[in-house]
Image (tube, rainbow, N blue to C red):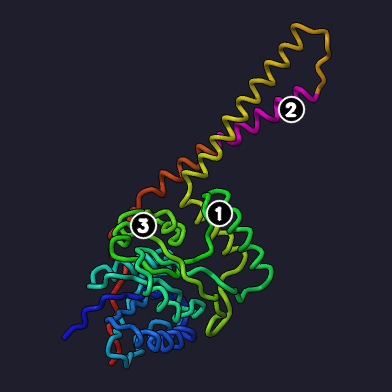
Amino acid sequence: MRMQPTLAIIIPCLNEEGALPLLLKELEGVLTQVKEQCLIVIVDDGSTDATIHRAQAFHPGAPNVSIEVIALPYPMGHQEAIYQGLLFASGSTAQRFVVMDGDGEDDPAAILAMLAQPSGIVFVARGKRAESSGFQLGYALYRLLFRLVSGRSISFGNYSLIDRRVLGAVLDQSFIHYAAFLSKQRAPTSIVKSDRRRRLEGVSKMGLDDLGMHAFKSLIEYSDRLLALFLKAFLYLSVVFLLSVLTIVGIKLFTQLAIPGWASNLSATMFNSMLLCLGFFVMGLMLSKATQRRERAGQHLYKRIGRQA
């Protein structure tokens, strides 16, 4: 009889042949403590090593755990792998869905705390981190920038749990940064805390350049607020520029005072700043419009992989 899962765990992987088997063994041990049927969905994001074969070869011994392996046609990126994994899991009977990384940095033990929360969205806030001091400084700057733009703090990543209602919004709308997208949803939200561990095997794949792109994508999820900031700056500069021009004209027409050269330079600089803000606003508006609709929404880009005997 085919198992009817109520919990699905989506694990996107790219070249994790060493870490994935260790993570699956640890995850199975945690799921034996869960009193419900669990489905693990491994999403191979075009790996060039033996990741997919290691995933196929893993056979859980726990009676409440089953595994499905799907593969993307080529490396499509972490966020698309998450989307495709959730899309596949949506066809199951699962009512709650966990997304976690395949390198072991997300502690599987946090799942027990997540399941104890009744909220539609449960985030795993980062406790201690194992990265270098430089990376942690960059991450702190990213969190500060995110707060300035969005008005919200972000102390969490993709490691999270959602219910089927939230899943509907995830699959229907466009996202390029899963965690930031979830932070915008109007659903009951809880946060549990868990330390960010070191990889189970290998070297971390996320450097400062990757962190910068990660931050950029998160801000695009709040592009409406980012555009509002540029629009406000443009309006404020417009008012100041107009007052400056009126002041200079008034001095010229109604006084004998000399107009210093810095006044003209200041006016020109402010005008250029206005155009720059307006340009950013227009470009951002176009970018926001382009990302509002997922062109591949609902398309199954994955291939289901048969398990090895």
Q: Looking at numbered disc 1 in the image, what kind of residue is underneath it?
A: Phe
Q: Looking at numbered disc 3 in the image, what kind of residue is underneath it?
A: Ala
Residue 267 in the magenta stretch? The answer is yes
Where, quadrant-wise, is the N terminus in this rendering? bottom left
In the rendering, which numbered label is found on residue 187?
3
Using the image, determine if residue 116 lies above or below residue 279: below
Q: Residue furthest top?
A: 254
- The region drawn magenta spans 262-280
Disc 2: CA contacts within 10 A as few (<14), some (14-19) or many (>=20): few
Using the image, determine if residue 123 lies above or below residue 259: below
Q: Which residue does the image show at 31% across and 66% down from the upper left?
A: 163
Q: CA distance from mark 3 to mark 1?
A: 20 Å
Residue 111 drawn at (x, y percent) = 41, 77
Mark 3 vs mark 1: give the one in front: 3
> Is residue 126 visible to the viewer in this orientation of the structure?
yes
Q: CA distance from mark 2 to mark 1?
A: 31 Å
Mark 2 vs mark 1: give the one in front: 1
The reply to whether callout 3 and callout 1 are in contact (CB within 8 Å) is no
Q: Which residue does the image show at 53% across and 35% down from the upper left?
A: 231
